[in-house]
Image (tube, rainbow, N blue to C red):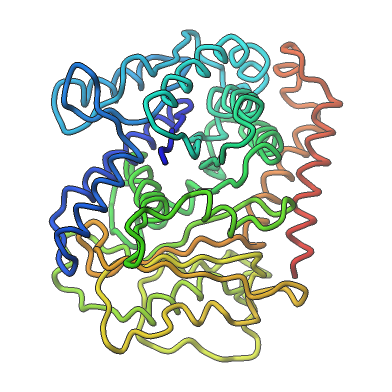
């Protein structure tokens, strides 16, 4: 049951590199608390799922396709592992076209995408032939520029036609609120509206949120893009590489998406995780109980009174605390379609009913059941004593969606930068259709409350 990762643009390729590096790092770390056979099973399943061995060498090749309209980033990450290291990229799984996409979704979707599609699909076919069975395709992209958004959208749309029975998921990075690309709100709404129907599920990551995590939790003074990519990779690895104690094979990504996206009107998911502690501070931190971690992740779903009038209070930016969660009546939660808790690490005798807090009826709309499942893996993650990740599909995503749609609409009503899109065949009617689609998605999530 192999997985192919399609890395679009600078952001997608950098995240993909961090993701595969994190997978290898997790497999290489000696684990305690599990038997040798369990550890070997975990590593073997992970290698089979994400890597293949090249014919001419005994080195591991990532099951990935690298797509870009500029060669700089691909050259950097490909050469980084071409001569040394335990894994590398396959040189035949690269689709490259020079010229860039000019931070323009229309250029990427209307021109660059069609020109690159055949080669991208050929690389993906070659990936599929390298495995017994291709089960899932994961797309990595950012919505700010033109390649990840435009070329990515076009290829994903055609990928669905080519692989109608495969699970297709996307990990999408939303740009900084005050980004340098003036057309990023256009690019974002166009991308999300295009891939929403064709993907079985989309995992949203926010650059602003990731930067705050790096500053507040990891205490990094000069946060760079690689720090943000590392956080995304850690979250993805915690969710996509899980082997439960009573199952010798890894949990299928298709099963995760089947639970997380029970209805086609709700396809946006996010990943909350804890604890995130600076490396130099780990040996001074006491071990946390699973109940504390699961309660902390539940707090990340709270609607705080200040959120209605001022900045959003983000509980994921705080360290878990042993102080019990307040039971005040004013505490409300963003309504959830479904939740999935993944815990990795040793169990104590008092650890029973882990994640029971996430069955709270306050988390779910009155017309929906408490849709929650829990996977536990005794094998540690990245040698952390305990690590928990909450995959959640809830109305919290509307804050970012509303902000982006409003910014794009303001630009559109002023006809700002429209000429850059119309010259590549994207007209005002297409923008109107996009806004209708995005407002429908926002309305569906608003209806959860």
Residue drawn 36% across and 56% down? 242
Which residue occupies the foreground of this view, 62 or 52? 52
Residue drawn 29% across and 58% down? 218
Q: Is residue 26 above or below residue 339?
A: above
Q: Say whether residue 299 is visible.
A: yes
Which residue occupies the foreground of this view, 339 or 293? 339
Q: Is residue 71 above or below residue 45?
A: above
Q: Is residue 170 above or below residue 289?
A: above
Residue 342 coordinates in the image, percent (x, y) = 41, 65
For residue 372, side relative to residue 429 (left or right): left
Q: Say whether residue 183 is visible.
A: no
Residue 40 coordinates in the image, percent (x, y) = 19, 52
Residue 129 coordinates in the image, percent (x, y) = 42, 23
Work out which residue is located at the far front of the displayed protein and give it: 132
The number of numbered badges drawn on the structure is: 0
Check the picture and name the quadrant holding the C terminus. bottom right
For residue 395, side relative to residue 440 (left or right): left
For residue 215, side relative to residue 422 (left or right): left
Check the picture and name the quadrant holding the N terminus. top left
Residue 442 coordinates in the image, percent (x, y) = 75, 53
Which residue occupies the foreground of this view, 421 or 148? 148
Residue drawn 28% across and 59% down? 219
Which residue occupies the foreground of this view, 238 or 303? 238
């Amino acid at each position: 049951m192999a997985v192919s990762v399609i890395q679009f643009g600078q952001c997608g390729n950098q995240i993909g590199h961090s993701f595969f590096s994190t997978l290898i790092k997790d497999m290489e770390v000696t684990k305690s608390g599990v038997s040798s056979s369990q550890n070997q099973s975990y590593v073997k399943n992970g290698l089979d799922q994400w890597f293949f061995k090249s014919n001419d060498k005994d080195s591991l090749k990532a099951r990935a396709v690298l797509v870009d309209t500029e060669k700089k980033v691909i050259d950097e990450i490909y050469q980084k592992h071409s001569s040394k290291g335990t894994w590398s990229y396959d040189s035949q799984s690269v689709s490259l076209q020079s010229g860039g996409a000019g931070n323009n979704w229309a250029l990427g979707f209307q021109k660059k995408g069609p020109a690159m599609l055949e080669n991208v699909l050929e690389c993906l076919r070659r990936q599929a032939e390298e495995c017994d069975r291709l089960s899932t395709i994961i797309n990595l992209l950012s919505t700010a520029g033109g390649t990840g958004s435009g070329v990515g959208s076009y290829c994903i749309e055609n990928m669905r036609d080519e692989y109608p029975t495969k699970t297709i998921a996307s990990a999408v990075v939303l740009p900084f609120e005050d980004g340098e690309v003036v057309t990023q709100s256009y690019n974002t709404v166009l991308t999300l509206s295009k891939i929403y129907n064709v993907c079985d599920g989309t995992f949203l990551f926010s650059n602003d949120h990731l930067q705050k995590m790096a500053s507040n939790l990891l205490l990094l003074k000069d946060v760079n893009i690689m720090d943000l990519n590392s956080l995304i990779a850690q979250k993805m690895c915690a969710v996509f590489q899980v082997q439960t104690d009573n199952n010798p094979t890894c949990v299928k990504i298709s099963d995760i998406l089947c639970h997380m996206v029970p209805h086609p009107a709700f396809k946006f998911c996010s990943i909350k995780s804890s604890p995130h502690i600076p490396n130099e501070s780990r040996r001074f931190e006491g071990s946390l109980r699973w109940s504390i971690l699961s309660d902390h992740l539940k707090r990340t779903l709270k609607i705080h009174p200040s959120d209605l009038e001022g900045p959003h209070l983000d509980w994921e930016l705080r360290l878990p605390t042993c102080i019990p969660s307040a039971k005040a009546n004013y505490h409300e939660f963003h309504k959830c379609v479904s939740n999935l808790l993944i815990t990795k690490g040793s169990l104590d005798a008092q650890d029973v009913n882990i994640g029971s807090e996430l069955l709270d009826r306050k988390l779910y709309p009155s017309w929906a059941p408490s849709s929650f499942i829990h996977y536990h893996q005794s094998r540690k993650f990245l040698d952390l004593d305990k690590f928990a990740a909450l995959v959640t599909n809830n109305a919290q995503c509307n804050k970012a969606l509303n902000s982006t749609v409003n910014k794009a609409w303001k630009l559109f009503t002023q006809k700002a930068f429209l000429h850059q899109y119309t010259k590549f065949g994207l007209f005002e009617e297409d923008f109107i259709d996009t806004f209708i689609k995005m407002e429908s998605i926002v309305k569906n999530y608003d209806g959860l409350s």
